[in-house]
Image (cartoon, coloured by chain):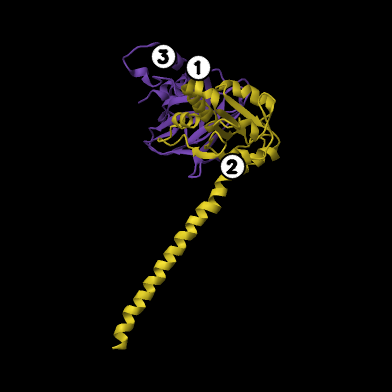
């Protein structure tokens, strides 16, 4: 019985220690995550976000999965002097330590393909981001023509309905700890 | 003594030769501009394009369809996640800004991915944008004929099912008589498509 309690105690303590083990997951912060509103009939969508690496080593975004879609890929769009737009698939996007990588219109984006039911405007879509070191981070992406206004204003003193929504969203977000560390 | 007088003579003849060369070049250049480059530009005119496409309402569209009104034509595809919906949104804003003038302008979105962009799909897709914009598709040959006639580049990126299309992202502007006016680049901060189209419609 005593050993049983002992084992249970060790088990419980180790559970508490688990998040304390040096995990790089807490070093990655996601901001301004949004998906461009889809035209009717479209099966693809573009996702954008800012990724900040607060860690001491570089990390790499190596993949993503979006709910309601077949797959999500990392893409880079370029436009040359002749106005030719080119799209290229990337194996990964590196986020150097202490830096923020922006996946923004005109550059990098998440190419979300095979969207079964078009994403509803102003809704939030769960997207799981896969990092080489930080593992997976699931975060909501706002569907609109740009990032949600005041998306990053959860710490600001001005209270508005957007913020209220954000707070609620964060409580649902298991990555709350790692996304609000700074 | 003879050496001294020969040097200036040589210079004079060299100078004459240079002036002659410049004159020949200038005349040649003017001739090129007038008789060769101009036809090159007229080759871009809408009335000189040979194609039969289908609009998103299922009606046949040839170059004649654009006659008598200025045109703004954009090439893209519906599986394009960024530049095509953005450009079509921008054109929708321009059409709204133009108000009644927009009724006097042809706005067209030509797919360079006709295999996936059927009339049915385009008829859905176009409802997301200003109703002045007409979606055009057709056989790969007809789409190719129109695109290459205007010098529009497009290429499928891979053979898989989820391919992308690289393509020219400029908007082609044409005058009321169908003559090519210029290309518009919405990424340029100096571009004012609303004003350009208003001027063409006047």
User: Which of B180/B79 is in front?
Assistant: B180
Give me the C-alpha separation between circle 3 and circle 1: 12 Å
Give me the C-alpha separation between circle 2 and circle 3: 47 Å
Q: Which residue is mark 2?
A: B150
Examine the rendering and report whether any part of residue B186 can be seen: yes
Asked if marks 3 and 1 touch (Cβ < 8 Å), the reply is no
Q: Is residue B124 above or below residue B14?
A: above
Q: Are marks 3 and 1 on the same chain?
A: yes
- Sort mark 1 into few (<14), some (14-19) or many (20+) by Cα contacts within 10 Å: some
Colour that chain A carries in the picture = purple
User: Which of B87/A32 is in front?
Assistant: B87
Q: Which residue is mark 3?
A: A162
Q: Which residue is mark 1?
A: A122
User: Which of A22/B141 is in front?
Assistant: B141
Tag in front: 2 or 1: 2
- Sort mark 3 into few (<14), some (14-19) or many (20+) by Cα contacts within 10 Å: some
Give me the C-alpha separation between circle 2 and circle 1: 39 Å
Location of residue B151 (image quadrant): top right
Q: Secondary structure at mark 1?
A: loop
- Chain of residue at mark 3: A
């Amino acid at each position: 019985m005593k050993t049983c309690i002992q084992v249970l105690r060790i088990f419980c303590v180790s559970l508490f220690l688990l998040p304390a083990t040096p995990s790089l997951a807490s070093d990655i912060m996601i901001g301004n995550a949004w998906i461009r509103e889809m035209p009717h009939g479209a099966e693809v969508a573009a996702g954008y976000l800012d990724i900040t690496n607060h860690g001491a080593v570089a990390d790499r975004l190596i993949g993503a999965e979006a709910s309601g879609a077949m797959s999500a890929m990392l893409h880079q769009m370029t436009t040359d002097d002749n106005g030719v737009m080119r799209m290229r698939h990337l194996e990964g996007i590196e986020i150097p330590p202490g830096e923020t990588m922006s996946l923004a219109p005109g550059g990098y984006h998440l190419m979300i393909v095979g969207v079964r039911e078009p994403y509803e405007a102003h809704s939030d879509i769960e997207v799981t981001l896969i990092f080489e070191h930080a593992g997976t981070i699931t975060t909501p992406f706002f569907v609109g023509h740009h990032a949600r206004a005041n998306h990053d204003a959860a710490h600001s003193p001005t209270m508005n309905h957007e913020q209220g929504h954000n707070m609620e969203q964060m409580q649902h977000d298991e990555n709350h700890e790692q996304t609000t560390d700074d | 003594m003879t050496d001294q007088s020969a040097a200036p003579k040589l210079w004079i003849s060299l100078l004459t030769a240079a002036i002659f060369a410049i004159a020949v070049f200038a005349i040649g250049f003017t001739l090129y501009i007038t008789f060769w480059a101009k036809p090159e530009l007229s080759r871009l005119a809408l009335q000189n394009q040979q194609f039969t496409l289908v609009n998103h309402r299922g009606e046949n569209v040839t170059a004649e369809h654009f006659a008598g009104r200025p045109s703004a034509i954009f090439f893209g595809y519906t599986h394009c996640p960024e530049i095509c919906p953005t450009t079509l949104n921008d054109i929708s804003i321009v059409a709204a800004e133009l108000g009644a003038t927009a009724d006097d302008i042809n706005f067209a979105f030509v797919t360079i991915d006709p295999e996936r962009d059927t009339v049915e799909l385009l008829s859905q897709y176009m409802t997301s944008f200003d109703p002045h914009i007409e979606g055009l598709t057709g056989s790969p040959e007809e789409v190719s004929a129109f695109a290459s006639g205007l010098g529009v580049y497009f290429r499928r990126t891979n053979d898989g099912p989820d391919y992308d299309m690289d393509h020219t992202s400029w908007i082609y502007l044409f005058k009321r008589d169908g003559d090519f006016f210029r290309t518009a680049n919405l990424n340029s901060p100096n571009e004012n498509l609303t004003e350009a189209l208003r001027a063409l419609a006047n």
